Amino acid sequence: MKELVFIGLGLHNEKDISVNGIEEIKTADTVYAELFTSPMPNLSLVNIEKTIKRKIFVLSRKDLEDESGKTLLESAKRGKTVLLVPGDPLIATTHVALRIEAETLGVKTRVVHGASIISAVIGLSGLHNYKFGKSVTIPFNEEYGGISETPYDVVAQNKSVGLHTLCLLDIKAEEKRYMTIREGLKVLLEVEEERKQHIITSETLTVGIAKAGSKKPRVKAEFLKELLKYDFGGPPHSIIFPGKLHFMEAEALVVLAGAPEKVRETAR
């Protein structure tokens, strides 16, 4: 059977994969995994291999993006093929493109969903999901030969209509480089220094979240100048810039994220 099944690995370790996902892997002819779209510091593919009793082949960014997933798609043409993906399989546009290409080639595709960093981070913050605007990734500067101002613009657009902004942070899995909350904030402050629009300043209320999906995630809401001093530990890191706060959201930030008491005064 020509088939390609995208399976979400979840957020933290190999125990996050669903029972349905494990059952799908056991009936696959070939199993691949990619680990470059999102960090899973405690993931052990070896433990998954012991459970499914077969080898998992790891694909690089080059395999899936530069070579358009040729190895994966050729495998799917021959039989049931699984691609294990951190988080939820179709959050990254890379995988959407692969699914479209597979269907175009006559390969049936299916998805076994996993926990997503997006829903996890929003949930941990205590902010209301329906009040989030467009999300954005803060890239390392070398990606653009300088600082990308797009994240700053997205935060500005969302704030103009009272919406919250989720900022995902860049990773270079092959180099084991993961942007930290401090690094991401410094990038945005550099844009603020240049633009001077008072969108992101030292007094901006900011939420930092690390290790979502683990037993001990770190969630801290503070004014930006104070958040720069906070130790969030290892990756993955994410940043949220709140927009207009409902009184329940303000209460959640104080109680669940240790925000300053005066944040309650800003709620409506």
Image (spheres, grey):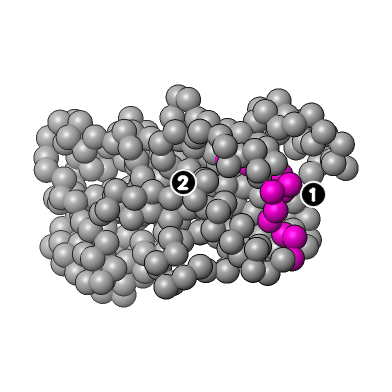
Residue 165 at x, y percent in the picture: 64, 54
Q: Is residue 248 visible?
A: no
Residue 67, compared with residue 246, is above or below; it is: below
Q: Which residue does the image show at 61% across and 34% down from the upper left?
A: 220
Q: Return the mark for residue 244.
A: 1
Q: Return the mark for residue 180.
A: 2
Callout 1 crowding tier (Cα within 10 Å): few <14, some 14–19, many ≥20: some
Q: Which residue does the image show at 62% across and 47% down from the upper left?
A: 240
Identity of the amino acid at label 1? Answer: Lys
Q: Work out whether residue 50 or residue 157 is closer to the camera in this orientation and state it.
A: 157
148 displayed left or right of 4: right
- Which image quadrant for residue 121? top right
Q: Which residue does the image show at 84% across and 40% down from the upper left?
A: 267
Q: Is residue 249 visible?
A: yes
Residue 167 at x, y percent in the picture: 56, 53
Magenta residues span 197-208
CB atoms of marks 1 and 2 within 8 Å: no
Circle nearer the viewer, 1 or 2: 2
Q: Secondary structure at mark 2?
A: loop
Residue 148, compared with residue 81, is above or below; it is: below
Quadrant assignment for the C terminus: top right
Q: Secondary structure at mark 1?
A: loop
Quadrant assignment for the N terminus: bottom left
Callout 2 crowding tier (Cα within 10 Å): few <14, some 14–19, many ≥20: many
Q: How far apart, in angstroms, are the residues tagged by discs 1 and 2?
A: 25 Å
Q: Which residue does the image show at 43% across and 29% down from the upper left?
A: 214
Give yes or no for residue 139 being in the magenta stretch.
no
Q: Return the mark for residue 233.
A: none
Who comes first in sequence, dot 1 or dot 2? 2
